[in-house]
Image: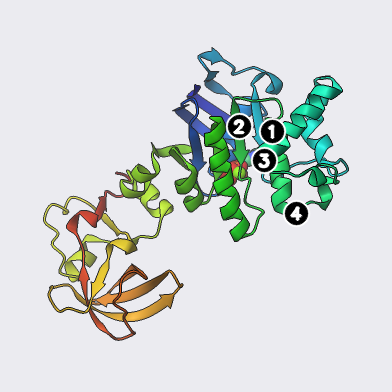
């Protein structure tokens, strides 16, 4: 439905996005994920029409929209800052775009009421000045305003970044439910790995304006194609071949690689002395639902994640056996796959 073909985006002489190609399917929740400054907002602004691209082509449903003005692209937009009109009521904010389009009052009222119900805003909140709403409510107003004109595509740029952790979790669930219920095609930008994994049908991982990998959350997390993706998407122990040898790990078939990653939840611990891989607990961080242990195995450190469903508890200086499946050692070549 949305196609980027060899898109290049520049700020004067600075090449922010050299050569970007991807496709988003209708009804898909598609997330652009990457560290700050990697070109997510730039890509979104080009899609929405705020930025002219210097090369390539953008299509929607096979139609070239590369040079179409913003209001002809049929997209709703939600920004990190919400960008609401602070002196207007919620109702006026939501209806603003329809008023600009000179829709009649009756239609606007009806539509505002309809959308308010969709995003759970009450009549009371509709008549308040938006400045008097909480952060979470303002975020709902921003979404309501973005969908007022029934766009087929919704783009969101870090819409939850300004909210506290608990509210962020609630609202991201709401955004997902909402997107699924109304079958909206969503292009969502975040630097938050967990948010991307939880929300997305597919994730595009960006690094310095380039795509590292596109895939489902499972593919991105469990089958990271590059060292960058593996590092960025979750915690990982990072080793050289020498480190693995020092730990007495079997390195047959791994010798042609340079870097090795092991996710902490794949490092299982037990008190039984039944393996070659023995270590000592050197630190313990308790988080309630889970505990992180740092283990020293022949002078090499290893981080292990144990959920509270593991009934065995370990204390500092305990001797432990480390159980590791060889398939959970993820090998990469220097800087590449
Ligand atoms: P992200 O949203 O992933 O944090 P951006 O798309 O905002 O990243 O920025 C990508 C790169 O483009 C960064 O190096 C940033 O400094 C640069 N950049 C962004 N906006 C401008 C601008 N208006 N002028 C010049 N450079 C910009
Ligand atoms: Mg940004």
Q: Nearer the viewer, residue 6 or 152?
A: 152
Mark 3 or mark 2: whose residue is earlier in sequence: 3
In the rendered structure, find residue 119 and report the number of the disc placed on it: 3
Q: Do the residues under discs 1 and 2 have CB atoms within 8 angstroms? A: yes
Q: Position of residue 218 (x, y in %)?
A: 35, 45
Tell me the SS state at disc 3.
loop
Residue at (25% x, 72% y) in the render: 269
Residue at (72% x, 49% y) in the render: 137
Q: CA distance from mark 3 to mark 2?
A: 14 Å
Q: Position of residue 13 (x, y in %)?
A: 61, 33
Q: Is residue 323 left or right of residue 187?
A: left
- 200 up-or-down from 330: above or below: above
Mark 1 or mark 4: whose residue is earlier in sequence: 4
Tell me the SS state at disc 1.
helix
- 10 up-or-down from 80: above or below: above
Q: Where ligand 1 lies, by quadrant?
A: top right
For the C terminus, which image quadrant? top left
Q: Is residue 217 left or right of residue 31?
A: left
Q: Do the residues under discs 1 and 3 have CB atoms within 8 angstroms? A: no
Q: Which residue is mark 2?
A: 154
Q: Which residue is mark 4?
A: 134
Q: Do the residues under discs 3 and 4 have CB atoms within 8 angstroms? A: no
Quarter of the image for residue 122 reads top right
Residue found farthest to the top: 63
- Which is in the foreground here, disc 1 or disc 3? 3
Q: CA distance from mark 1 to mark 2?
A: 7 Å
Tell me the SS state at disc 4.
loop
Q: Which residue is mark 1?
A: 146
Q: Position of residue 317 (x, y in %)?
A: 30, 86
Mark 3 or mark 4: whose residue is earlier in sequence: 3
Q: CA distance from mark 4 to mark 2?
A: 23 Å
């Amino acid at each position: 439905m949305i196609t980027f073909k060899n898109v290049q985006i520049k700020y004067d002489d600075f090449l922010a996005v050299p050569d970007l190609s991807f496709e988003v399917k209708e009804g898909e929740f598609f997330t652009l994920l990457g560290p700050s400054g990697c070109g997510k907002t730039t890509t979104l602004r080009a899609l929405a029409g705020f930025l002219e691209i210097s090369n390539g082509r953008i299509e929607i449903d096979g139609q070239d929209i590369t040079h179409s003005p913003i209001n002809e692209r049929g997209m709703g937009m939600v920004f990190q800052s919400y960008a609401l009109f602070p002196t207007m009521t919620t109702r006026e904010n939501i209806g603003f775009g329809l008023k600009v389009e000179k829709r009649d009052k009756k239609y606007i009222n009806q539509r505002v009421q309809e959308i308010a119900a969709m995003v759970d805003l009450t009549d009371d909140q509709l008549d308040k000045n938006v400045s008097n709403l909480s952060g979470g409510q303002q975020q709902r107003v921003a979404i309501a305003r973005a969908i007022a004109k029934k766009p087929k595509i919704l783009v969101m740029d870090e819409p939850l970044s300004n909210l506290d952790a608990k509210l962020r979790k609630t609202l991201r669930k709401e955004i997902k439910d909402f997107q699924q219920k109304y079958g909206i095609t969503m292009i969502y930008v975040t630097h938050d790995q967990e948010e991307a994994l939880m929300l997305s049908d597919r994730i595009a991982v960006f690094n310095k304006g380039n795509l590292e990998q596109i895939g489902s959350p499972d593919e991105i997390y469990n089958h990271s194609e590059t060292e960058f993706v593996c590092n960025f998407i979750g915690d990982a122990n990072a080793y050289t071949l020498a480190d693995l040898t020092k730990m007495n790990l079997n390195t047959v078939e791994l010798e042609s690689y340079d870097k090795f990653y092991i996710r902490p939840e794949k490092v299982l611990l037990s008190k039984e002395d039944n393996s070659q891989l023995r270590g000592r607990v050197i630190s313990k961080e308790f988080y309630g639902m889970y505990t992180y242990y740092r283990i020293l195995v022949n002078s090499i450190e290893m981080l292990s994640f144990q959920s509270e469903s593991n009934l065995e508890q370990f204390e500092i200086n305990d001797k432990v056996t480390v159980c590791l499946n060889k398939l959970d050692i993820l090998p990469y070549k220097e800087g590449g796959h």
